[in-house]
Image: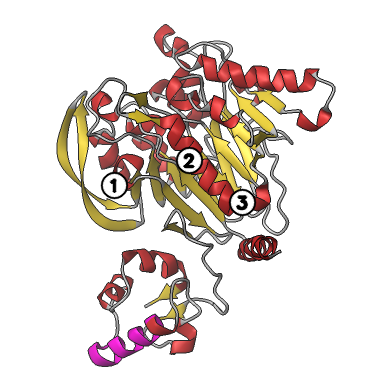
Amino acid sequence: MKTLLAVLMSLLIYTANAQMRVHLINVGQGCATLIEFPCAAILIDTGGETDAQYNSSEALKAYLDDFFTRRSDLNHTLKCVYLTHPHKDHTLGVPVVLTPPYVIKNAVTDGLEEGSGKAGQIKLHRAAQDSEDNSDPSDDIGFEAITTADVGVNGITNSVIDAVNCTGTDPTIKILWGTSATNPGWTDIDFKNANNHSLVIRIDYGASSMLVTGDLEEAALASLLKKYQGTNLLDADVYLTGHHGSKNGTTQELLNRITPKMALIGMGDLSRHVLWTAWAYGHPNKGVLDMLQKSITTPRQTIPVKAGTGAKTFVDYSVSKAIYATGWDDSIVLEADATGHWSKIDPHAEPTPTPNIVPGLVNVNTASETELETLPGIGNTKASAIVKYRQRHGNFSSIEDLDRVPGIGPATIDLFRAYVKI
């Protein structure tokens, strides 16, 4: 009874706070992105990197097990699994999610069955087909294979692509790109490259948004930009950096259209010096990091990293913008509310309480302790510390100055940044 009560209370709190969480799971050199909503969860790609030093399928299973233990109300169910394209670093974990206790309700791919990860993609295709062929409709997996011919100027969505229906803030999920059945004017090499047929996925949660471009390379990115010229469908808060930070997966023109607040990179640990790793590919590329640093508007505490200048070749680099990579940061969780406010949180944290009173922006130079306590991440102790610091040292000249207050650091500042003014 106590366990049931705890589950119900956890669900009630999460639903009341109405947040979306983006989990970029550390699967080494690859991608697996779990999107968590108050009423459901979806998974984009399944990793990853498997060699003598690392097993991405084990890492994926461990993360999903921990997640569903916390979100037991979801009953190990993924409302949809999306595979952007059939390369091994995006499909290797398909057998994991097709194995009980996990349940898949829908699947969306680009339909291709060639490439290094074709085994995983084919396995998901056959699972969807077999589910409809048997006599039990309760285990049917809805399925869509998307081509660019299917996708109109507003993208495409339906009950399979967007199977999530939450009360309150209901997310919108669209596909903006898929397989090109005919050559749109690319070179033969570009047309035969499965990367260029990746699904492009857009997720909106109220005023918060995210864009996933799979492993699209320059030729396809140019076509994507042309297709959505004059629309805001590529404009998003969070960009899952294309092709693991490869030099051919992001262009300045693309970033100019996205105008991202934050970027995520799914890439491996550079200490693993074997084939098919971030080290072997030179990910993430220094030129891409330079473009992201120039384009992203949100800061992060400066960290030293290595930036690739070629295969197996790196230079020292400092990241000071909100660029998060699994190779540097391990698994990453970003949390968004329906107002467009994003923050990076601990992967195991409980939902951040929604502020009780925010009648506009709180002025940290004039607000009382009671008003300060309404801000995310600020309780009685930190509110008192802000007032005491202000009394002793005078007004704050910037939001970053709050870092000088005992008990408040960059992570806490990111939580309440959207709710305060100077």
The earlier-in-sequence mark between 1 and 3 is: 3
Say the numbered circle drawn on residue 4.
none
**Above or below, 260 relative to 146:** below
The earlier-in-sequence mark between 2 and 3 is: 3
Q: Read off the residue under disc 2.
A: 62
Q: For the residue labelled by badge 1, is the local secondary structure a helix, a strand or a loop?
A: helix
Quadrant location of residue 407? bottom left
Q: Where is residue 117 in the image (x, y as percent from the top left)?
A: 48, 17
Residue 168 visible to an observer of this rendering: yes
The span picked out in magenta is 382-394
Q: Distance between the residues labelled 1 and 3?
A: 29 Å
Q: Read off the residue under disc 1.
A: 293
Which mark's residue is nearer the viewer, 1 or 3? 3
**Counting other residues with Cα less than 10 Å from the Cα at mark 3, is it few (<14), some (14-19), or many (20 or more)?**
many
Q: Residue furthest top?
A: 188
Say the numbered circle drawn on residue 37.
3
